[in-house]
Image: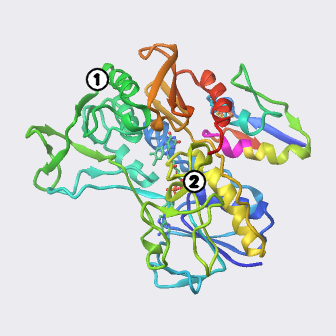
Amino acid sequence: MGEVIIVGGGLGALRTAESLRGAGHSGPITVVGDEPCLPYNRPPLSKDALLTGIDMSALEFRRRPSVEDITWKLGHRAIASDLSTGTVTLDDGTSLEADGLVVASGIRPRRLPLSGPEEGRFVLRTAADAEQIRSRLTPGARVLVMGAGFIGCELAATARRLGCEVAIVALDDEPMIRPLGPEVGAAMRRRHERQGVHFHLGLTVDSFQGDERVRSVRLSDGSELAADLVIEAVGSVPNVEWLEGNGLDLSDGVLVDSSMRAAHDRMPVVAVGDVARYPLALFGPTPRRIEHWNMPTETGRRAGHTLAALLAGQEPDRTPFTAMPAFWSDQYDHTLQSFGMPGLATTIEITDGSLEEPCVIEYHDDAGLVGVVGIDRTKDVLGYRARLAERSAS
Amino acid sequence: MVRIIVDAEKCQGYGQCCFEAPEIFTLGDPPVTHPAEVDEALRDDAERAADACPLQAITVE
Ligand SMILES: Cc1cc2nc3c(=O)[nH]c(=O)nc-3n(C[C@H](O)[C@H](O)[C@H](O)COP(=O)(O)OP(=O)(O)OC[C@H]3O[C@@H](n4cnc5c(N)ncnc54)[C@H](O)[C@@H]3O)c2cc1C
Ligand code: SF4
């Protein structure tokens, strides 16, 4: 039968457990998660839930009956592991042993090593983070968002809706420039500006000012911006420290093959979700780490089957992994939806509408269509998904 | 038979369900249409669709 430990208590953990059961693994499964709660949905934490209130019972994922018998060790953190003996050590000093390991520990927000007071600085990843931020988003509060990625922009939109004064500071020339490109990023910036968000682009925060708590920030051009709270949304760090010393490639998350298996000869190890780096067949051989909500489900499905096969002494499915990255983002009344990898494009084409209105944008690379983004055109974007899937697996 | 319920308050027509289980879900107006019940053989497809819904709007019984 074999015992399985899953480290990380998020969406990827849940989907992998369900997939293990679906693939016929009937042995014990233990999930170690450092948050105190069962897996829940994170995207609303920067959107609806931040706006209207964080109700865990509404955020918790539905779980399939097949995983009712698994053990949830919640509020526990894995701090080390020895794959040669199949041991995972927890923060309370105890250790667990297993025959198979699932890495589902996700990422954490990157924090910049800047001088100045700590109090008044926030990040957003967990429901607890969102609670802390929400209680401070009062009308008139001056909110400074560092970083102009999706989470930074969603936070800015929600803070404006709650009546806060909002400024975004980012080194990039336009918001969401890496996934969307400069033209579409600029079009989204104008939507934010119309809602009263102030952008300070091409700049970084050099230091925080204030005695006990942050009162203002100093920017790289020497200017100073007053702030009641600062939210750092400047990228992520994969949670892999607990895997060090086992010879795995941890250079950017956990490197795995198309079956989601990490290279280790003693113990079957698979990785899923935000922490995993895997080849995505539709977009070439380069392994990629993708922080999109649909990927924990896609990778979890594959990883569960792989691990069940390995534990049963069978060969895993090594056929190309052809999952399609999908992303959506809600900002004010606008919904952005994307399929594929628009960030890989060399040219874009607005095929329907104009950038100031609802529109569909095609993204192309040498091999043709590589991604699509719709602004308030969800239904029209859907049709592209099938076209993208036709990209020959290379 | 497998009962399928889509919470119309939650659903925003993202259409992920229609990709996972095109034989059950169709994009339309209301955003998705589907039979109230489907054959047991389609249970797995229905579950996949429920997994894929970003708003967790689908219940499978
Ligand atoms: C605010 C926010 C908004 C988002 N919005 C969108 C969106 O609109 N669209 C979209 O496509 N995606 C969005 N995402 C991304 C999406 O939520 C993630 O891709 C998804 O949650 C990843 O799931 P995961 O299971 O891989 O990781 P996680 O959900 O991060 O789960 C990992 C879990 O493991 C725990 N953990 C870490 N290390 C250890 C350890 N050593 N021991 C024990 N437990 C550990 C973590 O605390 C966490 O609970 C958003 C994310 C956030 C934070
Ligand atoms: S995936 Fe969910 S939100 Fe999207 S159309 Fe289907 S039920 Fe509605």
Chain of the residue where label 2 is placed in the rendered structure: A
The residue most toward the left is: A222
Q: Is residue B50 a member of the stretch shown in magenta?
A: yes
- Front one among A65 and A376: A376
Callout 2: helix, strand or loop?
A: strand
**Numbered range of the magenta stretch:** B49-55
Question: Where residue A117 sits: x, y (%)?
Answer: 16, 56
Say what amino acid the circle numbered 1 marks: Gly
Q: Which residue is mark 1?
A: A196
Callout 1: helix, strand or loop?
A: loop
Q: Residue at x 59, y 54 (%)?
A: A11
Question: Where residue A276 sits: x, y (%)?
Answer: 53, 59
Q: Residue at x 49, y 78 (%)?
A: A246
Q: Residue at x 62, y 48 (%)?
A: A281
The mark found on residue A279 in the picture is 2
Q: Quadrant of residue A183?
A: top left
Q: Quadrant of residue A98?
A: bottom right
Q: Earlier in the sequence, mark 2 or mark 1?
A: 1
